[in-house]
Amino acid sequence: MAVEHNGPGWRKMPAGIILRLEDVSKRYDRRMAAHHITLEIAEGECTALVGKNGSGKSTLLRLLAGLSHPTQGRRLTEAGRSLRVGLVTEKFPALPFTPGEFLMSMGRTRGMDRRTVQSEITEWLKRLGMEPYRDVRMSHFSKGMLQKINLVQAVMGSPRLLLLDEPLSGIDIPSQKEVIRLLMDMKGMGTAMVMSVHEPELINQAADRIVLLENGRIVKEERGFRIETVRYAIILFHGDPLRIRQSLEGIGDREVAWVKEGSESEIHVRTDLSDHVLQRILHGGGHIVSVSLREPSGVDLGELLQTAAAALEGGTR
């Protein structure tokens, strides 16, 4: 979805600032979804929103997009310049159109000429591995495929501000890497981005600052923050599971997770403890079948928030 802003709410901004929320609150019936939020968005800067479900991330994105009007406060844009906003929603419907039909319609609605739209559709679909599905109806698409089309419609026409609600949701690991490269290219061209996200890789590569939300309030804001990810090794082994469990006593459930138990057992172990755990398995009479690295898929959101809050509180990096 793209929104063009060129009307009331203009204001002379500090250099580089393209959008400002000023003491904004939002009420839905009796529920306050946003409380006194003041936030400035700078050209070419990426802001990562983190918080639990219901913390107000999606509401804040809609306020920034201008799709939701504040109950209190103001949304301000630059005087004399229009602000085209691209929006990636978390859920994208399985529409009864092909990507070619849908994206052409979106581009033409935004005032793009047909040749430019065709060129951009081809470029973006190729980058995301979706060109073979250009003429396939989206009602047959998986969640990940729909999310790629969702992303394409948002970046078409080079928006100055890109708002993303869980942009990597449902996308496979190799495609996630291409999406991150695409977003980094957009950022390099000066596009500002605000994203609700929980994948540490995306935060580490793209985010210039993290904003932590809780109950519709901004409770922490930090620049230069890096999320440390935990990697795990997959260990397959033969042996008596009871004896092996006894040999692993003292190692917590967060460090070792039993996935399968039987004649061939499988455990997932933090890589920094894998050598120690292998020695204990052998000491307990086990025989190692294989050791491999588990592909990271992002840390648990609760763990991320705990880490982020502690780091922002203590000023650690």
Image (cartoon, grey):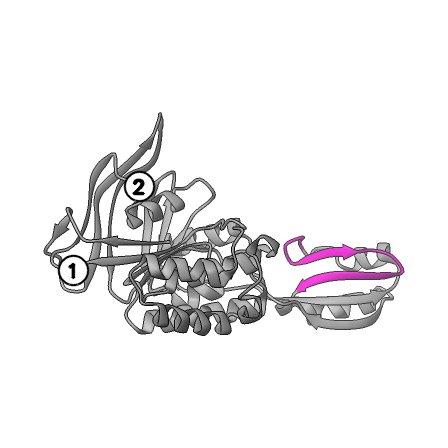
Number of other residues with Cα within 10 Å of mark 2, as a class: few under 14, some 14 to 19, many 20 or more: few
Q: Residue at x 63, y 54 (%)?
A: 254
Tag shown at residue 284? none
* 118 up-or-down from 79: above or below: below
Residue 221 appears in the picture as rendered: yes
Q: Secondary structure at mark 1?
A: loop
Q: In the shown orientation, is residue 297 left or right of residue 235? A: left
- Whether tag 2 and tag 1 are in contact, CB under 8 A, the answer is no
Q: Position of residue 211 (x, y in %)?
A: 35, 53
Find residue 138 and report its horizontal and vertical position in percent: 55, 56
Q: Where is residue 182 drawn, in percent x and y?
A: 43, 71
Closer-to-camera residue (50/270): 50
Q: Is residue 79 magenta?
A: no
Decide if residue 151 is on the left or right side of residue 284. left
Read off the magenta span: 252-269
Q: Quadrant of the C terminus?
A: bottom left
Q: How many residues crowd around disc 1 within 10 Å: few (fewer than 14), some, or many (20 or more)?
A: few
Element at badge 2? loop
Q: Is residue 263 magenta?
A: yes
Three-letter residue code for mark 1 = Arg
> In this orientation, does residue 298 appear?
no
**Image position, residue 111 (x, y; %):** 29, 61
Q: From the viewer's perspective, is residue 308 above or below residue 234?
A: above
Give the labeled residue for mark 1: 81
Give the labeled residue for mark 2.
68
- At label 2, which amino acid type do we have? Ser
Give the residue displayed 79% in from the left and 66% down from the top. Answer: 236
